[in-house]
Image: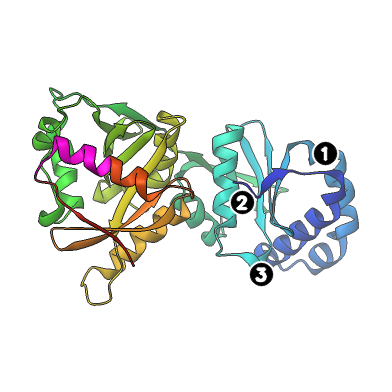
Amino acid sequence: MNNIRKAHEKDISRIAEIIVVNYRINFYPFFRNDEFYFGELNVLDTAKDFSENMLENTFVYDDGIIKGIVCTDGREIKKLFVEPQFRNCGIGAQLLNFAVDNLNTDFLYVLEYNKRAVKFYQKHGFELTGEKFIEDDIVPMLKMSLKNIQLKEIPQNSPEKSVLEKINQEAFPQNERISINDLYSSNKDGNLSIIGIYADNILSGFFVTRKFKNIVYIAYFAVSSEKRSKGIGSRALRLIRNYYENYRFIVEFESPDEKCTNNNIRLHRRNFYLRNGFFETGLYNRYRDVEFIVACSENDFTTEEYMEFIAHLRSIVPEYRPEIYRK
């Protein structure tokens, strides 16, 4: 989120450009109103209107060039636009996540015809509520609200263990999977937690975490098959970082390998973590004939920190003997 900042008055003309070009690209094909989209709608008037009404609640993505904007009004996201040339670079997702995490937004309205936008918001945890209104007598707008995602630690005697095991078996191949009961049994130092991911109060996934000094190691992270690709994973990953505030996070994911039948899944998992703020450390961990990339939530993580953690983990799980190396 380092490239996102509050908008200033000097940004208004650039913001107006982004709004105008997006209205023309996103809305003109459906309404074909030449007089409005290429006459009434112009940068000068948009800038004036924006300055008077929305600047106070606007944030921009600025990496030297302003490439996207998000405007809010209380809990509502009023506008979220990215310059078309910079789409598919993760900018829209960063702006959306910023608005949700920092501005407490949880709903928006989207043009019914704009299926691309609907899918984008669904991917990031919003769902259609069934509410609809007609704006300006001709524009059908659909309301979308953010799913309620919560994290709760699940104790060993919980009746939900069977649900956890079902998700566990869906998510991990047998050679990488440890049963939920065995995971609880490995909590010899009291620093292992199994944290449930609840979407609208339904257990939909889980984290297995281990704390060591200022490190939280995400040993397992899974979302149930019917809940995947709905934005739950990304939101849960952001929430777990708030759950363990002021900790550094380590994750390991399988190295992409074109020879493997599950290479697409490996690439997807790697991109997921990198897209959500993790950095590859340059370290690799080979265990049970599978190579894993070691990633961290901070880009200054050291080999010494990782090796110290691995030594601690081996003191708890003696049979865990990975090969650690750099390439």
- Asked whether, in this view, residue 258 is left or right of residue 63, the answer is left
Q: Earlier in the sequence, mark 2 or mark 3?
A: 3
Vertical side of 211 occupied by 40: above or below: below
Q: Is residue 295 above or below residue 290?
A: above
Tell me the quadrant of the picture where the C terminus can be found. Answer: bottom left
Residue flagged by tag 3: what amino acid is it? Gln
Q: Who is closer to the viewer here, 49 or 166?
A: 166
Residue closer to the observer: 227 or 294: 294
- The local secondary structure at tag 1 comes to helix
- Numbered disc in front, either 2 or 1: 1
**Image location of residue 126, percent across then percent down:** 47, 44
Q: CA distance from mark 3 to mark 1?
A: 27 Å
Residue that label 3 marks: 85
184 vs 135, left or right, is left
Name the element at disc 3.
helix
Mark 2 residue crowding within 10 angstroms, few (<14) / some (14–19) / many (20+): some
Q: Which mark is residue 140?
A: 2
Q: What residue span does the magenta drawing correspond to? A: 309-318
Q: Are marks 2 and 1 in contact (CB under 8 Å)?
A: no
Furthest toward the front, the residue is 304
Q: Nearer the viewer, mark 2 or mark 3?
A: 3
234 in relation to 175, above or below = above
Colour setting: rainbow
Callout 1 amino acid: Asn
Q: Which residue is mark 1?
A: 53
Q: CA distance from mark 2 to mark 3?
A: 27 Å
327 on left or right of 134: left
